[in-house]
Image (cartoon, helix red, strand yellow):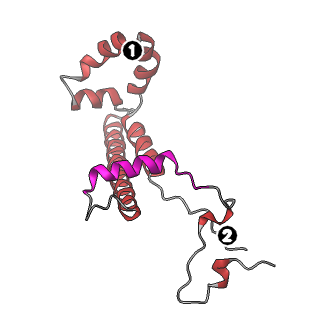
């Protein structure tokens, strides 16, 4: 049986995983994905060149790590706000002996009292009236805790670190 490079170096102190390019046919140049190209261009604009050298892979990795950290932090804040909204609804419901749910539209109106009432005419005039009535109206009638919790979980899922592919420990 064929011994994988990683398995052969497993007991060495300088073990390094094999390159992912090993499965690519010889002579075929590696094509970078549009994400890598866009990130390189973004890094070239954010990070100033050092001694004429543009952004390196370490800077791109740093940018990914920072974006993942900020996304997870914002997701945590959304989940905490959703949990607080759930607790507030629960306390209000127990106090009044009936179920009281704070709608997301009510919360948005309390947060943005001047700009929120202008949202409906803007959507109906610039997009289409059908966008407001079935879609956005039902969205704003959803409980606040559900909306905040959903978007918090969605951001956590998006910022989740995926396992690396290309290394086959089984050989």
Q: Is residue 117 above or below residue 142?
A: above
Picture residue at 31% right of the left edge, 62% below the top? 53
Viewport quadrant of the C terminus: bottom right
Q: Which residues are magenta?
A: 29-48
In the rendered image, which residue does mark 1 sit on? 127
In the rendered image, which residue does mark 2 sit on? 168
Q: Earlier in the sequence, mark 2 or mark 1?
A: 1
Circle nearer the viewer, 2 or 1:
2
Image coords of residue 102 (percent x, y) = 34, 32
Give the class, few, some or many, for how many residues have Cα within 10 Å of label 2's Cα (few <14, many ≥20). Answer: few
Q: Secondary structure at mark 2?
A: loop
| Residue 36: in magenta span | yes
Q: Toward the viewer: 74 or 58? A: 58
In this rendering, position of residue 1 left or right of residue 38 = right
Viewport quadrant of the N terminus: bottom right
| Residue 93: in magenta span | no
Magenta stretch prevailing secondary structure = helix
Image coords of residue 55 (percent x, y) = 34, 58
Picture residue at 24% right of the left edge, 56% below the top? 48
């Amino acid at each position: 049986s064929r011994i994988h490079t990683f398995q052969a170096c497993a007991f060495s102190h300088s073990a390094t995983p094999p390159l992912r390019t090993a499965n690519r046919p010889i002579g075929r140049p590696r094509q970078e994905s549009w994400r890598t190209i866009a990130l390189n261009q973004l890094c070239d604009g954010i990070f100033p060149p050092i001694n004429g050298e543009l952004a390196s892979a370490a800077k791109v990795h740093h940018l990914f790590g920072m974006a993942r950290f900020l996304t997870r932090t914002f997701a945590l804040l959304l989940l905490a706000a959703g949990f607080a909204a759930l607790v507030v609804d629960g306390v209000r419901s127990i106090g009044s002996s009936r179920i009281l749910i704070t709608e997301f539209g009510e919360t948005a109106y309390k947060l943005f009292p001047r700009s929120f009432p202008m949202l409906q005419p803007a959507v109906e005039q610039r997009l289409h009236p059908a966008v407001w009535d079935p879609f956005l109206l039902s969205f704003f009638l959803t409980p606040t805790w559900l909306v905040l919790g959903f978007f918090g979980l969605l951001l956590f899922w998006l910022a989740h670190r995926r396992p690396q592919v290309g290394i086959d420990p089984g050989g």
